Amino acid sequence: MFRRLISIFITIPLAIVLIALAVANRGTAPLHFDVFNPQNPALTINAPMFIWLFAAVGIGVLAGGIGAWFAQGKHRKMERRYKKEAASLRYEVEDQKRNNGGETKPGQSLALSR
């Protein structure tokens, strides 16, 4: 519930600001891809300024997400290793229980020695 309220209190003002930006920046702005000859019409795109703003924000979000994904790669790798180890230990415990007839003696380890 608290998370939903925080989301609402952040999303609604952000949407209002973005709508205000879009309305205020309706004029066209050129984007020149030719840095040596900016007057070249073949490499110039005219679009409303809010399109360029939204595109910049989208590219920033995408780049941040990709950067975070790569930065967390080592943690995902360790998690896979730990899950594999836990599954291996679970099978060892079940194998030990099967060999003992489902009963363990007090003080007896459930894990097999390696």
Image (spheres, rainbow, N blue to C red):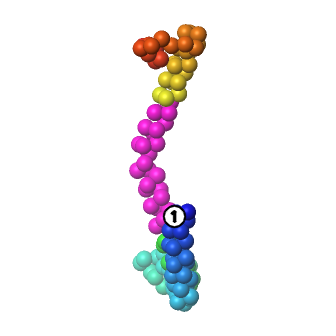
The reply to whether residue 9 is visible in this rendering is yes
Identify the residue at horizontal 55%, vertical 76% (top origin).
12
Residue 72 belongs to the span the image colors magenta: yes
Give percent across and percent down for residue 32.
Answer: 48, 79
User: Which amino acid lies under the numbered mark 1 shown in the image of this protein?
Assistant: Phe
In the image, is residue 89 above or below residue 45?
Answer: above
**Which residue is at the front of the view, 62 or 47?**
62
Q: Quadrant of the C terminus?
A: top left
**Which residue is at the front of the view, 5 or 76?**
5
Label 1 crowd (10 A; few <14 / some 14-19 / many >=20) = few
**Which residue is at the front of the view, 46 or 67?**
67
Direction front: furthest residue: 106
Q: How many marks?
A: 1
Does the magenta stretch mainly form a helix, a strand or a loop?
Answer: helix
Identify the residue at horizontal 54%, vertical 81% (top origin).
16
Give percent across and percent down for residue 88.
Answer: 51, 24
Give percent across and percent down for residue 31.
Answer: 50, 80
Identify the residue at horizontal 43%, vertical 48% (top origin).
72
Q: Quadrant of the N terminus?
A: bottom right
Give percent across and percent down for residue 51.
Answer: 55, 79
In the image, is residue 61 above or below residue 9?
Answer: above
The boundaries of the magenta stretch are 60-84
The reply to whether residue 28 is visible in this rendering is no
* Label 1 sits on residue: 2
Asked which quadrant contains residue 98, the reply is: top right
Residue 61 belongs to the span the image colors magenta: yes
